[in-house]
Image (spheres, grey):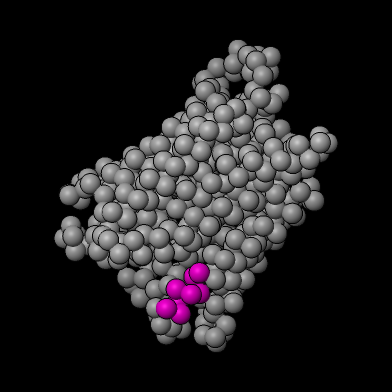
Amino acid sequence: MSDGVTNLRHDLRVIGLVGSAHASSHFFHLILPPLFPILKLDFNVSFAALGLLPTLFYGASGIAQTFAGFLVDRFGARRVLLLGLTLLSLSVIGYGFCFSFWGLMFFSITAGLGNSVFHPADLSILTNKISTGRLGKAYAIHAFSGNIGWACAPIFIVTLAGFWDWRTATILAGLIGLIIVLMFFLSGELLIENSKEHKAKDSEPLKRTNPLFSQIIALLSSTVISCFLFFTFLAAALIGIQTFGVSALQVLYALTLTSATAALTAFLIGSALGILIGGVIADKVKKHQIVAILGVALASLVLVIIGGNFISPYFVLPALALSGFFSGITAPSRDMLVRKITPPGASGRIFGFVYSGLDLGSSIMPLLVGALMDGGKADMVFYSCALMFVIAIITVLKIPDKSRSITV
């Protein structure tokens, strides 16, 4: 068998394993929100209180993600990924045994801590184990798998909750994560980084010349901060649409709940398709900044059109699908931009810190958009998300389009 075929099979196995882990993490993101109407009655709490659960989840994940990146660089991505997925899965199982709202809050925090490892560990593995010519596609499949996890969770959890009850549903969901953990154990040495980035001859000088304090200071460079802010505002726009897009469409276009939900689903499907095409583009172009800027700009323009009520209700679904498609195209190039600024031996902490911006944007934006909806400003939901995209473009302009631009 030729080396090319062997390398392809190796890359596909790695991408498959890492993609399954990423899908599970996104799957767990949307385990509780579809159950909010049931949880509201069971625990006798307000929707505002229930909204605290994802805030705690993303807050804990964002705070811990940079630290998780350091653990990845110190102990290896596979070990940290297994630990995080195990903690996340057990936390979801823990939901099913909660008989007080405080318990849900506690397990939301521990689930967030488990979730914190995925981006630094996943992307470190892909960066170090996948052939350079396939890296853009690998990043695309990684992002695509996350969207698949999002899409599957509501259907899974609501169906099982209706068939049995919500406690059984969350326990079964957590068991799926533990099955994936078992898959990782059976994968043996496949995901252990053995590239030049992790060989002792490269890592030891790095440790001697760059102590922990210097490594932390390097994360505060203008280049890394620009990437962090890009991810923050990008996530804010996407989460704003995911959380209150349905409610805003019902007000702006008098859509039924079913039609508005279908439009949001179209946005997610469009994003997933854009990610796959964006992966091919990322492998073929060198100016990843341009791809990111164009994709985000077009996505923003479509949101302005929707928010301005410039189109017929019949065109809302394809318009949102188009916005999702444009934003999805940017995802692989976004990851390639981070890779370009990441020096050898620092992929875990760089990806960890930069991707914590996703959690920051995800935790803050729902509060802002929710206040706009309470004030009867449904159009501002789409305008504010479009504004987040525009600010994201400004941050991209600050990212040097050249490799290894910092020293960590």
Residue 260 colored in magenta in the image: yes
Q: Is residue 310 left or right of residue 370?
A: right
Residue 278 locus on image (x, y percent): 69, 56
In terms of depth relative to the viewer, which is nearer, 302 or 40? 40
* Drawn side of residue 40 relative to residue 231, left or right: left
**Residue 333 visible in the shown view:** no
Horizontal and vertical percent position of residue 273:
64, 63
Is the residue 384 above or below the residue 18 in the image? below
The answer to whether residue 383 is above or below residue 35 is below
Furthest-right residue in this view: 2
Q: Quadrant of residue 268?
A: bottom right
Q: Position of residue 114 (x, y in %)?
A: 41, 38
At a point 42% along the width and 78% down the height, the residue shown is 258
Relative to 13, is 268 on the left or the right? Answer: left
Q: Is residue 107 left or right of residue 116?
A: left
The answer to whether residue 185 is visible is yes
Residue shown at 55% from the left, 17% from the top: 211
Quarter location, residue 401: top right
Q: Quadrant of the N terminus?
A: top right
Identify whether 278 is placed above or below 252.
above
Q: Which residues are magenta?
A: 258-265
- Measuring 63% from the left and 27% from the top, which residue is drawn there? 193
Report the magenta stretch's main SS: helix
Q: Within the image, what quadrant is residue 64 found in?
A: top left
Quarter of the picture holding the C terminus: top right
